[in-house]
Amino acid sequence: MKHIYLLALAALAPFLITGCVTGGVGGAYHVVAYKPHNPSDVRVAVSKSTQQVYVMEGDRCLMAAACNVGLPDRPTPSGHFNIEEKIPDKRSGSYGFSVSGGMVTPCDASQAHGAYVGYPMPFWCGFEPGYGFHQGYVWPVPRTHGCIRLDKQVAPRFYELVHAGTPVDIAQTQPEDATIGRHVQRPSDYRDPDPAPSYMISSGPFRKPPGDLLIDQ
């Protein structure tokens, strides 16, 4: 175990120097996010080819992590945007659950036979009508309907780092891919079983991880 731990430290060494550590060792997905010195200088870059998101303050990396982008027939838009809204407990108006007589059944909103409860999209940061960053399982291949999905360890930290007006650049590649991006690992909890529908209609998905989300550097 000690030998494996030392190898992991060696792999992360470049980021111990540059100040942006991310990745998963031993199955858990660990992401470090740093407080910006000037929040108005924060910018976001998304690389669609690598499915990675970089939160930068000038040339300083505040956080780098894996993300999920849209399917080929439902692509994430490319271009220059700004964060337009932040909603910590947003739910989908299109996909979710029908709740009737104690039964909770996945459904489209138009097919609900009882009360409709939208699929949780925690820590929503919208950048275009119908598109935003939010928490969810992050697969190794494009998986979303155009939104940018972030791991449960990443989404609340991203939410804290950005504000209304934060610039967002989404492109096929980003300059950071060749530097910071080389050391970004991907989470593996997409392999876990889906949570129970009863959990998905509760407040559980909106809980923040324990401890400080952003650290000083």
Image: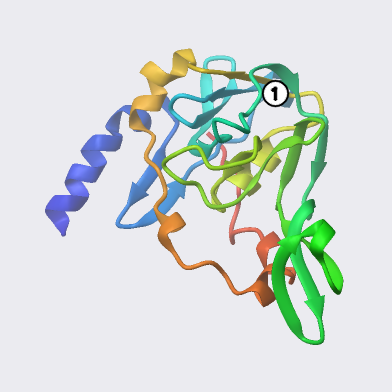
Q: As displayed, is residue 133 above or below residue 165?
A: below
Query: Which residue is most to the left?
Result: 3
- Whether 86 is drawn above or below 51: the answer is below
Q: Is residue 162 left or right of residue 18?
A: right
Q: Nearer the viewer, residue 109 or 163?
A: 109
> Where is residue 129 drawn, in percent x and y?
82, 31
Left or right of 49 in this view: 91: right
The residue positioned 16% from the left and 59% from the top of the image is 1
Residue 103, given in percent of the width and then of the height, sits at 74, 82
Residue on which disc 1 sits = 38
Q: Residue furthest bottom?
A: 101
Q: Is residue 29 above or below residue 206?
A: above
Q: Residue 170: name its quadrant.
A: top right
Q: Residue 11: x and y, percent? A: 25, 36
- Residue shown at the point (68%, 77%) measured from the top left: 198
Q: How many marks?
A: 1
Element type at mark 1: loop
Q: Amino acid at mark 1?
A: Asn
Q: Position of residue 197 (x, y in %)?
A: 66, 73
Task: Give the left or right position of residue 61, taking residue 122 as reference.
Answer: left
Residue at the limit of the structure toward the right, as seen here: 115
Q: Residue drawn at (24%, 44%), measured in percent from left and top?
A: 8
In the picture, residue 37 is in which quadrant?
top right
Residue beneath the point at 63% across and 33% down:
74
Q: Nearer the viewer, residue 154 or 39?
A: 154
